[in-house]
Image: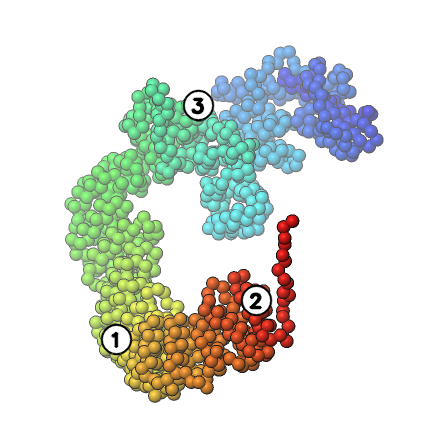
Amino acid sequence: MKLLEQVALLFQEGKSDKVYEVDLLEVSPGQCVVNFRYGRRGTPLKDGSKTPVPVPQAEAKRVFDKLVQSKLDSGYVRGGAPGTPVSPPAPRAPAAPPPTVEAPAGMSPRESALLAQLQQETSARRWFRRADVRAQPRALERVIWRAGELRLRAAEPLLLPLLDRATPLRAYTVAAALGRLGSEKSVSALGRLYGDARAPDMVRRMATEALLQLSDEATRADFRRDVLEKLPPAVREPARAGDAEAFGKALDAHLASGKADALEVLEPLYLVDSEAVRPALLRVLRTVPFSVQSVKVLRHLFKAAEYRYDGEVFGLIAWRYEKERTLGSSRPRAYTWETRKFLRRRVWRTLRRLGELESPDFVRMAVGVLLAFSDEDTAGPRTTGWGRHQQHWDTWWPYWAFNQLLFRESPRYEPVDNSLAFRCKGAYRPGERAPEAREESFPKLWERTPAGLLHLLDESVCAPVHDFASRALRACPDFLARLDVDAVAMLLERPYESTARLGFELALQRLDARREPRALLLAVARSSYAPARQQAFRWMDELRHVLIEDSGFIAGLATARQADTRAYAANLVRGSVLSEQTARTLVGRLVAALLQLKTKEDGPIASDVARVVLAAVGPSSRVVGLDVVRDLLAHPMPEVQELGGELLLRRDLRTEPVPDALLLLLVQSEHAPLRALGLRLLALLAESEATLLAQEELLIRLATSPVPDVRAAVRPLLGRLVAASSSAGARAVESLLAALLRRRLPEGIPAHIAALLSGELAPALAALPAETAWRLLESEDGDAQTVGAALLARHGAVLTVDVPRAVRLAGHDVLAVREWAWRWLEAHVPEVRAELATAVGLLDSRWDDARAFGFRYFRERFTPEDFSLEVLVSVADSVRKDVQAFGREMLTRSFREEDGPALLLRLSEHPAPAVQLFATTYLDRFASGKPELAEQLAPYFIRVLSQVNKGRIARQRVLGFLQREGRSTEASGRVALEVLHRMSATIAIEHRAAALEAMLSIVKAQPSLPIPFVVRPVEVRRAV
């Protein structure tokens, strides 16, 4: 083994005095290994290898260099030869003395101690520690981080030298500290750190955040524009345009693209953090599913938000850490139970340290954490343990930072550190009355920043947060006294009793004897606190004559979230006489409010507001234009649409016609009350003949409406239309028939059209051409056939009918049509006799009554001589057994001797066993002694003899006929032998003997015929 290269590395700092030696060894030509030794200097070193098996020399060299460089990057320096005493390298020039900083006047003891610790560390030599330097009680990185938290500006000269040859962790902490306490001197050092491609990503990210903190607004704007230019084009363009909605859609599309690095775009977006980017970014942070990639990105953003004191992003990601469970065993290093627990602890640790430092950023960060929670996050109370070990947990028990902020000083809850939860304390049980005392952490900090409490009351949707903030805000009377009317109104209208009660208390102090300011009176009336609303109603009763002219005030009452306030507004308007101007203004305000409603939950509000609008407009709707009605009808909420319909009903239809489009919109609505309004309006329009005729097209269209009640309501109106104008009735009938024949109407509509044509529109059917009746009758739609039957019954006497059509009608699906055709056939026997071959087609009808009529009709109305052989055979050829029986009966009645041979051949072709048996009756009579005819019947003989388990009599007759004919003549014997020989090999065993016996008898009678088999004598065996 040959040593090619060797490096000794040293690390001396504080109490550390370590050695790391690396060897590049050749074990065979071209094959090398990389070994290393490490440990405390002066002690036996531990061995290891970076190459378990030899590798090519080039690859080994790369491994060797990479290992050496990684140690140099982590703070090691090159020393002497391995195993030799190491002395510090002689400096080329005298080293600059370590910087010293005197503590400024007025510095706190904690800051002085930190500064002393930093100076002590910089005074220490890298290789040998001086005897008068005391070891630090904690790691230097913690001292640096704490200096940054305290913004100890005097520490900047001490921190800058530490960046030289710093470990990644130290570089990270120094960069973070300089970003908070540094000046322009720190910008260049941080810039070098940011631009160093060899620096770890975490260090560069922190350097970026620190530079943003130290830069002026223009520099930050330039940096963000540069970051923006590096975004994917699909995301960059809407972000650059400042369109928040378009950017949100583009970001969703980018994240849904399925790319492996799609989530990495969130980090540069947080650096941009513009008004167009932030809303979508916050939404994604709340909803992005947890995965290996998203956990990594969220953690980076979490640290950045923590550093920026961005409470909104910090609180949102902290909420995700509280809500999301681990990723499971398949991803053990991504988001484990230990990781989640650490992050949850870190959230509260960050808040606690800010509170302990009495930082003004504490309230901002705490507000962000609390605002992320909502009433939907409740976990529900629970009980664990039993007996005297029983423990009770209230609704919000699982959330660590949330409970620390709200209940750290609570007499009813206590933290459980190992599970990061809060449980009930002492005798307190979930649901019991809360104490009046303050329970939150750092109450004095909240009182110093009461604007944060007001922010919580304005935006939070979490009941415990409102209880805390309203109680804490009462301790800030000076701040409450400075609140404007809008702020008090906001408190009154929040849907939490504690907040609304605080607003009511403030309103009582501010309203004068005339209940001014009126905006505050309105806010009290709209309050979620019931006692406040009742008091407001009493006050408003005293001012009814004044308030009724204030359309804005009435509109505010009518659109309140509380039903009793809206009812008060409706009663106030009903019991007053409004001027036209007031009514117009009030209606305009209310309609504008209605058009802003979107969700189903707003349905009760929309209904109550509509009642106020109708009370304001009275019996006439002159104050509401048709455009407004159109907007109301186009609204997605049915309650708003109903108001539009009611306003249409109140119009003067003689002078203010209603467009068909609006009327159609009403009557075709999916909402039943709205359809009822449309039908009422349609009935009003049809009261005069002129308006009725004007609605002809609409009525015809509504006759095929998919809604049953609309079709039913239109029927009498169509009847009146036919009575008013025969031409209009004809057009209606033509349109409905065309729709019926298209056969594309939904279920129920064809039957309705048929009933309508047979009922109200029946008078208009007379003008229809005869061909229409035939089209209806020949349609495959049953309802169309019903209408055709009605036409046939009404106008059948004048219709031209021939025998083929009468036969088709005689087997029609509609009984009335069949009966009509039967009557026609009874009246036109001579015409039927002339086309008897066509007429017997009636017997193939699928209707039993039609066939029964045919049997009776052909028996009674025609003589045997009327039926030709072709007609009789066509009847006997039917696939129906009753028709076959009738055919055989008619053959028997109408048989003519000269037709015998032809009839036998025709009957022999039928596959039905009954007909085959019937044909055997003609064999001896017409085929006996006729070899040529027997030869034509050979297929018939084979079919009969091949039948299994049926046709026994027919088989016996055929076998007997063949045996007799075969013995009579040689020609007949040849035909019989051919059939019997073929069948003896295929027919059942039980009939084979009969076939063989018949062949033997034929051969005996006709010796000249060759026997198709060999006859062997019976072998006689005798016993020995």
* Mark toward the start of the polypeptide (2 vs 1): 1
Note whether 174 is above or below 677 in the view shown.
above
> The disc labelled 1 sits on which kind of residue?
Leu
Circle 3 sits in a helix, a strand or a loop, which is it? Answer: loop
Q: Are marks 2 and 3 in contact (CB under 8 Å)?
A: no
Q: Which mark is residue 417?
A: 3
Q: Disc 2 versus disc 1: distance between alpha carbons?
A: 87 Å
1004, 504: nearer the viewer: 1004
Is residue 869 something that shows in the picture?
yes
Q: What count of labels does the image hold? A: 3
* Mark toward the start of the polypeptide (2 vs 3): 3
Label 3 Cα neighbours within 10 Å, binned few <14 / some 14-19 / many ≥20: few
Q: Residue at x 55, y 47 (%)?
A: 258
* Mark toward the start of the polypeptide (1 vs 3): 3
Farthest residue in the front direction? 1024
Looking at the rendered image, the quarter that the N terminus falls into is: top right
> Can you tell which of label 1 and label 3 is closer to the viewer?
1
Q: Position of residue 216 (x, y in %)?
A: 54, 39
Q: Which mark is residue 996?
A: 2
Question: What colour scheme has been applied to the protein in the rendered image?
Answer: rainbow
Horizontal side of 272 relative to 642 (left or right) equals right
Q: Position of residue 918 (x, y in %)?
A: 44, 74
Note whether 174 is above or below 710 in the view shown.
above
> Can you tell which of label 2 and label 3 is closer to the viewer?
2
> The disc labelled 3 sits on which kind of residue?
Asp
> The disc labelled 2 sits on which kind of residue?
Leu
Circle 2 sits in a helix, a strand or a loop, which is it? Answer: helix
Q: Residue at x 58, y 17 (%)?
A: 136
Q: Position of residue 73 (x, y in %)?
A: 67, 28
Note whether 848 is above or below 214 in the view shown.
below
Residue linked to disc 1: 721
